Image (cartoon, rainbow, N blue to C red):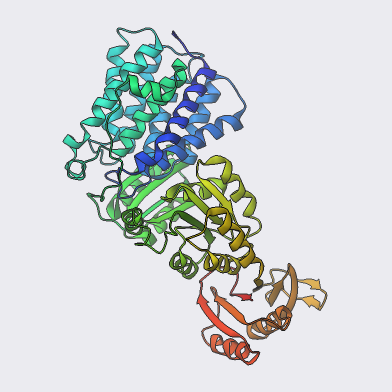
Amino acid sequence: MTERIDAKGLVRLIHGSLEALGRHKEEINALNVFPVPDGDTGTNMYLTMQAVVEEIRRSGDSSMAAVCQAVARGSLMGARGNSGVVLSQVLRGFTQVLEGHEDAGVPELALALRKGSEVAYRAVMKPVEGTILTVVREASEEGEEASKHHRELEDWLAQVARRARESLSRTPELLPVLREAGVVDAGGMGFVVILEGMLSALSGKDLEAVEEELARWDTPTETVSPSQAEDFRYEIQFLLRCEDEGVEDFRRELARIGGSVLVVGGDGLYRVHLHTDRLGEAVELASARGRMSDVEITDLREQVENLKAAGDTSASPGAMGEIGVVVVASGQGLREVFTSLGAGAVVEGGQSMNPSTAELLEAVESLPQGRVVILPNNKNIVPAAEQVKGLTRKEVVVVPTRSVVEGLAALVAMDGKLGLAENGERMARAASGVKTGLLTHAVRDSRWSGGEVRKGYYIGLFREGIVSHHEDLFQAAVGLLEAMMEGDEELLTVILGEGFPEGLEGSLREYAEGRGLEVEVIRGGQPLYPLILGLE
C-alpha cells in the first residue's frame, strides 16, 4: 500500500485519468450535459487532460513544483468547452496545494481536493448544483472525512471515488433537466472517471477491475434528446491576454450578453468561455480588453441536430454511412458546400491558418462514426492530419488533398457502400485528377519568369509557380486559366472568395464557356484568395 506520492507518482495518476477518459469519453458524450446543450463533454475533458500530459512532457522538470505548474498551465491553455474549463480550475486549485510539497500523503491530497473545489466554484459566475461542481465538492468533503481514518492512499481514494459516484447518481434529483432526460450529469461522470483512472494507476489494478470493485453506476447506452436551460446559439472560447484589474468587469459584461460564462486564469492570461447569440459584441468586448487568440466558435444548435441524427445515417448529409468525414476549409460558403456534400465536421483553416493536430483530433472524436476520412486540403496540413492516426482509437485515413477543389472532388467521389481503405484510394484518385489554380495579391515586389511582379498586383499561381500577373483581376484570372488548360479539360470549378468584384463573375463564366468548359461557381468566401480555380 502507498502512503505518499512524489512528482512521478502524481504524473502516473494524471496518465491514469487520461487513459480512463479515453475509454469512456463517448459514453460521457452521450449524456448531453446541462447546462451545455452539446454532446462533447467527454471529448472536451479528454483533450483538456491530454494537454496537461503534453505540457508535463514539454516541461522536462521532474520536481513536484514543476509538475504542478505544468498541470495548471497545460489545463488552462488546453481547456476545451465548459467542462474542460471547469476541470482546469479543479486542477489549478489541486496543484496550488501540492506544489509546496516534495511529496504528498492523504492529508495533503484531501486539502488539495478541497482547494480544487473552491477554485472551481469561484470560477463559475452562477454555480449550478447537480453538475460537476457538486460531484467535486461532495468528493472533497468525503476526502476530508476519510483523511481522519485512512493513511493509505488507495483506501482513501477508493472512498472518495465511491462518494463521487453516489453524488453523481443524485444529480438528477438536483436538476430537473437531467431527471426529464433520464441521465446523470456528464461533467460529473467525467470527474468520477478521472478518480477511477487515478485509483487504477495508484493500485496497479486494471481499470475495469477498479470499476467493478466500486460497483460502477448504470449509464444510458444511447444518446438522448438534449434538454437545456439556456437557448443560446453559439459557444465561443478563446485565450485573452489582458490586464488583471479589469477581469471582473469583463466577466460581468459577458454575463449581460450570454450564459455559461467562465473567465479563468491569472497573471495576464485568461481562458474565456461563453454561450451567446451576440458573437460580434463578445468579440468587441474582448478586443477592447486585450489580445485574443485560439478562438473557437461552435454552432450549438447545429451540433444538437447532428447529435439527434447520429443514430440515423440517412437523416443528415454529414453522415456518410459508417464513415465520417473531417474537412479543413475557410470561408462560410465553403463550409456549407462541404457540409452539404457529406462532411460531418469542418475545421477552420487553410493557407497561413493551419489547424493543429489537437484541433483535427477533436473533430475526429466529435463524429459518431468509428471510421473517419480526413481531407486536409493543404499540403502543410497533411503532416498534422497524419499524426491524428496515432492519437485516436478510431480508424483514420488521410487523403492528402492539397486544395479545397481537390477536397471537393474527393468528397464527391466518396461511396458510402465501400470500405474505408477503398474510399481512401478512390478519393485520392479523384483528387489527383484536379488541377488547382490560385489567384491572390502580391505582397511585395519581386521577379518571375515573365518579368517583374509589382506589389498589390494580382498573381496567378499554378503548380507552385507564378503563371500570370496583372493589375486587373479579370486579366490575371484569364492568364491563370490559360496556363492551366492543356486541351482535354471539361469542367471548371470557380470558387469566389473575399474581395471578388460582383460584376466579374458573369464575365469569367462567359470566357470559360467560350473555351468549351462547363462552369460551376461556388461562393466560398475564403480569405487571401479572391479566386480559386479547379480544372478537370
Residue drawn at 27 percent across, 22 percent down? 163
User: Number of labelled discs?
Assistant: 0
Is residue 268 at all visible to an observer of this figure?
Answer: no
Q: Where in the figure is residue 300, as x and y percent of width and height? A: 34, 55
Question: Image point 28% across, 53% down: which residue?
Answer: 256
The relative height of residue 352 versus residue 103 in the rendered view (above or below) is: below
Horizontal side, residue 5 vs residue 38: left or right = right
Q: Which quadrant: the N terminus? A: top left
Where is the C terminus found, in terms of image quarters? bottom right
**Residue 350 occupies which quadrant of the picture?**
bottom right
Residue appearing at x 51%, y 71% in the figure: 525
Residue 481 place in picture, x, y as percent: 68, 81
Q: Quadrant of residue 287?
A: bottom left
Residue 53 place in picture, x, y as percent: 53, 32
Closest to the observer, 284 or 150: 150
Picture layout, residue 261 above or below residue 118 = below
* Front-lying residue, 299 or 113: 299
What residue is shown at x 23% (from left), y 31% (from top)? Answer: 169
Q: Position of residue 451 (x, y in %)?
A: 82, 78
| Residue 475 vertical position relative to residue 463 in the rendered view, above or below | below
The reply, left or right, for residue 405 in relation to residue 286 is: right
Horizontal arrangement in the rendering, residue 10 relative to residue 398 (left or right): left
- Residue 54 seen from this side: yes
